[in-house]
Structures are given as structure tokens and as C-alpha cells.
């Protein structure tokens, strides 16, 4: 896993190497200070030698300034490396997500993907930042401190080894009990993000049904679970501090007890044993050794938190789209003819009942096809197989006489435009949204597409017209206006197949009719597939397909279906009596 995510360091390798290098050298100067302090006490202050006081004092000041400079450069390179690594990691994950099929996205859920791109990447960034600085500095400081301590007095320094073993075992015990909690916490974060996302996207419905208290209750319930888990984890991590204090005080007391005996026995003479300055150095080294262990424990804590995050990030990075180009993909779509040959489809291969069952259908290039059926009849699923948003389980779908799995995905989807019922517009101007269909479209081409889609009229009424700003999701437009802009956007692709997935449901019947008339005049050679709830939207089609429970119930013209399909006639009669057939 680490090898996978560390590939995102890339251009920040230099800073990633310099940060621990500066931190390591900084630790050396920090370790020199106690030894110089011992010389200052023993050979300067104790002997009242002003020359040695000035010499060792100058060495202390120089060491402090050098350590400070090295600390600055270590911190600077750490910040550059960690933030750059996080940026690359976030970009790498996002780029891989862009290759996902619908089924890949369904596997993780939108809320979980957002958590992994934000919270999880932030956790990994913090752990990386601590590792390349503290993770390098603390072990070196501990090693050098032990070396100098043993150099001063080997027998007394054995106290450090015992304390280190005790503290290490205690920290490992805490770590093993905390990791499972954080694994659970990040799954709860996914649920929390999902609740927030649903609430904000459906805020109008929430307010319309006065369900604010219900939504607050859902949010509070998950928040409390996260609080409980974090509280439990922090309580266990809080053992680090008293464990550290116990080791610090124990080693200080032992050093003071045995060290004072050594000083008395040697008469404070360095030639015969321990001196006051050396004991002071040993106590300082105690602080440095235990502080190094404490810093390492903090790194380990971040490892605990980030380990779960790393697993979740790598899971997304290693996920491959189940829709891939073949070894030699076809880069040209000959025409807009479509065939379904004995097609069966399931969203999950484990499902017993297929969503589409044994579909056989032929659509000629340039035909206008209507698709009608009740809710759950799999109308949308049928057309989603044409641009290969999903792959069939059995059979095959062809466009231009070629299996859609043999095309280059970009080529196929450039020639098969889909206008969805749930229209998505992005924050930006009308022009910027229209250019999603063709980034090189001229103003004249955009205006013409909007005229066909019956959008030009309401755009002209806006103060800024085609430069008018659209809020995220098109929230400052009506449903019908959003649908018409999305139709215009699709028209700019100039596709060979144009699919309307109930995408005129929010416009009135007259506007719907004008859109259909414009399409037949301007793009007569394009195959047009219209999924609709209104018979009026499809009655002029060359063929109408009636779907029922994942199967084709009937195929024919409007007149033919009125006599041959009871489902179609029932829908027609109900809409006629309700007045919704008025064109």
C-alpha cells in the first residue's frame, strides 16, 4: 500500500529527502548541547575559569543558532513535500475516479469517495509530514543521546535501556487497541457525508414536508457515534502522557540516586568517576531520549489514524473500470444504426432476475424511435447500453454494425449523446455549459442549438444573455429551462445517435413539439431515441417501443400500437381523457 501511494510524491522527492536530512543534522546539534553544558559546568563554572566559560558559552550559542537554522529549513521542506504529496495524491485518486464506470461509482458511493478525497488524504498528509521530519529526527536524537550517555557513564545509562523497552511495549499495546476504532470511524464519516449530501440536494423537499427535525435527528445520531468512537480512542491514546511521565520521573529519580552516590564517591573528580556536570548532561539526555520516544509515539498515533485512510485511498486507486477499451479499439462510428441481439442485463451478476431479458431490436440510421413504458420497465437501462455506460451480461449491442465493446470509449460517447431526465448543469456561464458539448463551438453554433432546443428565447430575456451565470446544478433556472439547455448542449456534439431520456418532461407540450420539429429538420440523418411518459412526445416516431418489466412488449407505429398493444392503448386513453395529448 505504501509503495502505491508514495508514487504520488514525484517532483517533491527532493524536498522529501532534504527535510529528514536537515532534521537529522539538527538533532546532532541538539545532542551536542548537553555535553557542552557539562564542560561549561565542570571546566568553567566549577573551576572559575572565565576563558572556558566564554569558550563553551560561545559553543552553546553557536549550536543553538545552527540548530534553529536547520529546524527552519527542515520545516520549510517538510511543508513543501507534504502539501505537494497530498496534492498529487488527491489528483491521482480523482483522475482514476474519472475512469470509473457507473458500477464502480455505485460500489463506493459518492459520499465515500468524497471522504477519501478530503478527510483520508488529509490524514495521510499529516502522517507523511510527521514521518519525514519527526520520524527522521526522533530516532537519530535517541541514538545519539544514548551514544553520548554511554560515553559519559555506561552503567548508569543502562537505566535508559530498561525505560525504553518498558515505554515501547506500553505504546505498542495502546496502538493495537486504537487502530480498529479508527477503521470504524472513517466508515461512519462516509455515512455522515451521505446524510449531509442527501439533505443539501433535497433541501427543498425537506422544507416542503417540514422534515427538518427528522434530518437533524439522523445527523445527530451519526455524529454521536463518531463522537463516542473518537472519545474511546482518545481515552486510550491519553495513556501515552502518563506513561511518558512515569518513565521520565522514574529515570530521573534513578539517575539522581545512583548518580549522586557516584559523585560523592569520586569527589566530583572526572578522573575518578561522575561529575555534577556529567550528571546534569545525563538528566538532559533522559529528557531527550524520552521526548524522542514520545514524538515517535505521536508519529505512531498518526500512523494508526492514517493506516485506515491509506487502505481506503489505495482501494480507490487500485480499482479499475469494468469498461475498458479492447486491444485495438475502433476510432470511427460509421452511422447511427443500432441493434440489440439477444441482450440480457443485470446490475449485479448475482441477481436472479435480469433487468433486461432477451432484448432483440433493430433501429435504422436516421430513424426516430419512441420508447414508452411504466415506471420500472427498464427504459433508461435499455438506452444506457448504447453509449456503453454499462456492459451487457449476455448478447451484444451494436452501433453502426459494430459491437460497442470494440469501439474506443471516447469515440463512441462522442457520437452517442444522451440528454438525461435529471439534467445537470455546472456553475458557470451559459456559454461555458453549452461548450461541454463542443469546446470549440462558435457563438453562432451555440445560438442555433439553443434555437432548436427552444432555449434562445428565455436566454435573450436575461440581462447578460449567453454570459448569464448559472448556479451549481442550475438552481437559478426552472426545470424546463435546464432541460432545454441540456438538449442544446447535446446538439452541439453533432452526434450520430441522440437519446432523450424523458428529457422534455418539464416543458409544455407545445414547446416539446417545436423541439421535435426542429430536430427532424436540422439533424434528419441522426438517429433519435425518445423516452417519454407522454404519448404526444412519441406518436410521430417512425417506431414506438413499448417496454414492460424489462421486456419489449410491442413495437410499431402509433396507429399500429393502438390496435395491437393493450398497454399503449391504455396509456393513450388515460392521457386523452386527461387532456395531456393536446399538442
Image: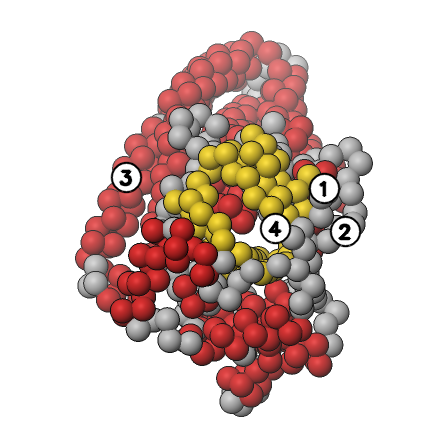
Q: Which residue is mark 2?
A: 334
How far apart marks 2 and 3 lie (CA) works out to 57 Å
**Dot 2 or dot 1, earlier in sequence:** 2
Q: What percent of the width, then of the height, locates residue 417?
A: 62, 58
Quickly name the residue at label 4.
363
Which residue is depicted at the point 63% across and 22% down? 143
Real-space CA distance between mark 4 and mark 2, rounded to the nearest whole angstrom? 14 Å
Give the Cα separation between the discs numbered 4 and 3: 54 Å
| 324 to the left or right of 255 | right
Q: Disc 3 vs disc 1: which is toward the camera? A: 1
Provide residue 63's location: percent of width, then percent of height: 69, 41
The residue identified by callout 1 is 402
Q: Quadrant of residue 51?
A: top right
Q: Secondary structure at mark 3?
A: helix
Instruction: Note whether residue 233 is visible.
Output: yes
Q: Residue at x 56, y 60 (%)?
A: 542
Front label number (4 vs 2): 4
Q: Would you say 499 lies left or right of 53 here?
A: left
The residues tagged by marks 3 and 1 sit, at their Cα atoms, a distance apart of 53 Å
Tag 1 or tag 3, which sits nearer the N-term?
3
Label 4 close to label 2 by CB (< 8 Å) = no
Amino acid at each position: 500500500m505504501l509503495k502505491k501511494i508514495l508514487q504520488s510524491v514525484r517532483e517533491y522527492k527532493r524536498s522529501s529527502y532534504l527535510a529528514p536530512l536537515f532534521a537529522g543534522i539538527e538533532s546532532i546539534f541538539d545532542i551536542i548541547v548537553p555535553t557542552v553544558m557539562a564542560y561549561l559546568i565542570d571546566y568553567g563554572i566549577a573551576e572559575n575559569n572565565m576563558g572556558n566559560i566564554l569558550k563553551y558559552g560561545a559553543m552553546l550559542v553557536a549550536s543553538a543558532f545552527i540548530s534553529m537554522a536547520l529546524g527552519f529549513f527542515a520545516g520549510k521542506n517538510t511543508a513543501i513535500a507534504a502539501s505537494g504529496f497530498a496534492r498529487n495524491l488527491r489528483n491521482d485518486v480523482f483522475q482514476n475516479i474519472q475512469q470509473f464506470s457507473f458500477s464502480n461509482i455505485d460500489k463506493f458511493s459518492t459520499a465515500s469517495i468524497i471522504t477519501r478525497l478530503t478527510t483520508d488524504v488529509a490524514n495521510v498528509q499529516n502522517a507523511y509530514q510527521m514521518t519525514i521530519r519527526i520520524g527522521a529526527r526522533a530516532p537519530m536524537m535517541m541514538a545519539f543521546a544514548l551514544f553520548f550517555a554511554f560515553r559519559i557513564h555506561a552503567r548508569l545509562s543502562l537505566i535508559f535501556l530498561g525505560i525504553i523497552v518498558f515505554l515501547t511495549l506500553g505504546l505498542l499495546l495502546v496502538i493495537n487497541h486504537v487502530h480498529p476504532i479508527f477503521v470504524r470511524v472513517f466508515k461512519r464519516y462516509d455515512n455522515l457525508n451521505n446524510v449531509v449530501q442527501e439533505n443539501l440536494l433535497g433541501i427543498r423537499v425537506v422544507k416542503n414536508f417540514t422534515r427538518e427535525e427528522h434530518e437533524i435527528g439522523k445527523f445527530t445520531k451519526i455524529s454521536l457515534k463518531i463522537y463516542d468512537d473518537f472519545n474511546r480512542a482518545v481515552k486510550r491514546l491519553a495513556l501515552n502522557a502518563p506513561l511518558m511521565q512515569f518513565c521520565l520521573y522514574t529515570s530521573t529519580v534513578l539517575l539522581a540516586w545512583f548518580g549522586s552516590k557516584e559523585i560523592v564517591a569520586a569527589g566530583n573528580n572526572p578522573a575518578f568517576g561522575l561529575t555534577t556536570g556529567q550528571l546534569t548532561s545525563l538528566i538532559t539526555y533522559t529528557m531527550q531520549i524520552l521526548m524522542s520516544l514520545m514524538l515517535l509515539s505521536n508519529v505512531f498515533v498518526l500512523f494508526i489514524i492514517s493506516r485506515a485512510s491509506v487502505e481506503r485511498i489505495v482501494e480507490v486507486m487500485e480499482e479499475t473500470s469494468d469498461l475498458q477499451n479492447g486491444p485495438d479499439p475502433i476510432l470511427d462510428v460509421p452511422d447511427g444504426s443500432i441493434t440489440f441481439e439477444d441482450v440480457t442485463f443485470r446490475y449485479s451478476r448475482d441477481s436472479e432476475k435480469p433487468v433486461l431479458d432477451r432484448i432483440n431490436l433493430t433501429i435504422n440510421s436516421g430513424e426516430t424511435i419512441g420508447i414508452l413504458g411504466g415506471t420500472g420497465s427498464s427504459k433508461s437501462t435499455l438506452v444506457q447500453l448504447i453509449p456503453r455506460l454499462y456492459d451487457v451480461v449476455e448478447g451484444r449491442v451494436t452501433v453502426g454494425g459494430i459491437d460497442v465493446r470494440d469501439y474506443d470509449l471516447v469515440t463512441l460517447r462522442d457520437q452517442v449523446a444522451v440528454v438525461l431526465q435529471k439534467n445537470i448543469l455546472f456553475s458557470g456561464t451559459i456559454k461555458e455549459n453549452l461548450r461541454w458539448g463542443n469546446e470549440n463551438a462558435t457563438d453562432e453554433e451555440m445560438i442555433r442549438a439553443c434555437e432548436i432546443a427552444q432555449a434562445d428565447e428565455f436566454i435573450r430575456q436575461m440581462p447578460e444573455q449567453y454570459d448569464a451565470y448559472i448556479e451549481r446544478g442550475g438552481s437559478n433556472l426552472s426545470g424546463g429551462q435546464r432541460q432545454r439547455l441540456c438538449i442544446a448542449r447535446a446538439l452541439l456534439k453533432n452526434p450520430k445517435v441522440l437519446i432523450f431520456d424523458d428529457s422534455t418532461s418539464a416543458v409544455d407540450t407545445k414547446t416539446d413539439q417545436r423541439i421535435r420539429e426542429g430536430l427532424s429538420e436540422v439533424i434528419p440523418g441522426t438517429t433519435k431515441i425518445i423516452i417519454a411518459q407522454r404519448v404526444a412526445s412519441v406518436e410521430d416516431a417512425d417506431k414506438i417501443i413499448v417496454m414492460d418489466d424489462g421486456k419489449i412488449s410491442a413495437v410499431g407505429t402509433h396507429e399500429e400500437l393502438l390496435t395491437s398493444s393493450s398497454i399503449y392503448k391504455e396509456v393513450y386513453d388515460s392521457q386523452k381523457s386527461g387532456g395531456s395529448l393536446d399538442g
